[in-house]
Image (cartoon, rainbow, N blue to C red):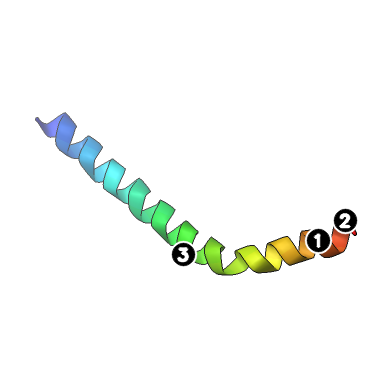
Amino acid sequence: MAGNEDFKEVFNWWYFLGAVVALLAFPLLPTIAGWFTFYFS
């Protein structure tokens, strides 16, 4: 049972980390896309 609880905590931590990364990355997507468009054109 303890192993399942540890796995659940790790999963929640990774899910939280992924959510933070997504929240930081999504606002930058247009900037990154525009930079690549400018760089390759």
Assign a secondary structure to mark 3: helix
Query: Residue 21 location in percent, x, y?
Result: 48, 58
Verify CB contact (< 8 Å) between mark 2 and mark 1: yes
Return the residue at label 2. Answer: 40
Give the mark nearer the N terminus: 2 vs 3. Answer: 3
The kind of residue on which mark 1 rests is Thr
Q: Answer with the quarter of the image where residue 1 lies.
A: top left
Query: Residue 27 location in percent, x, y?
Result: 56, 69
Q: Residues within 10 Å of mark 2 (few under 14, many from 20)?
A: few
Assign a secondary structure to mark 1: helix
Q: Answer with the quarter of the image where residue 20 lies.
A: bottom left
Distance from label 2 to label 1 (Cα)?
A: 5 Å
Return the residue at label 1. Answer: 37
Return the residue at label 3. Answer: 23
Give the mark nearer the N terminus: 1 vs 3. Answer: 3
Number of residue marks: 3
Name the one closer to the observer, 10 or 22. Answer: 22
Question: Which residue is at 90% across, 59% downward?
Answer: 41
Query: Residue 33 location in percent, x, y?
Result: 71, 61
The kind of residue on which mark 3 rests is Leu
The kind of residue on which mark 2 rests is Phe
Q: Residues within 10 Å of mark 3 (few under 14, many from 20)?
A: few
Query: Residue 23 location in percent, x, y?
Result: 46, 64
Q: Is residue 38 above or below residue 11?
A: below
Q: Is residue 12 above or below residue 20?
A: above
Name the one closer to the observer, 32 or 16. Answer: 32
Q: Nearer the viewer, mark 1 or mark 3?
A: 1
User: Horizontally, is 21 left or right of 11 in the view?
Assistant: right
Assign a secondary structure to mark 2: helix
Q: Residues within 10 Å of mark 1 (few under 14, many from 20)?
A: few
Question: Which residue is at 61% across, 67% downward?
Answer: 28
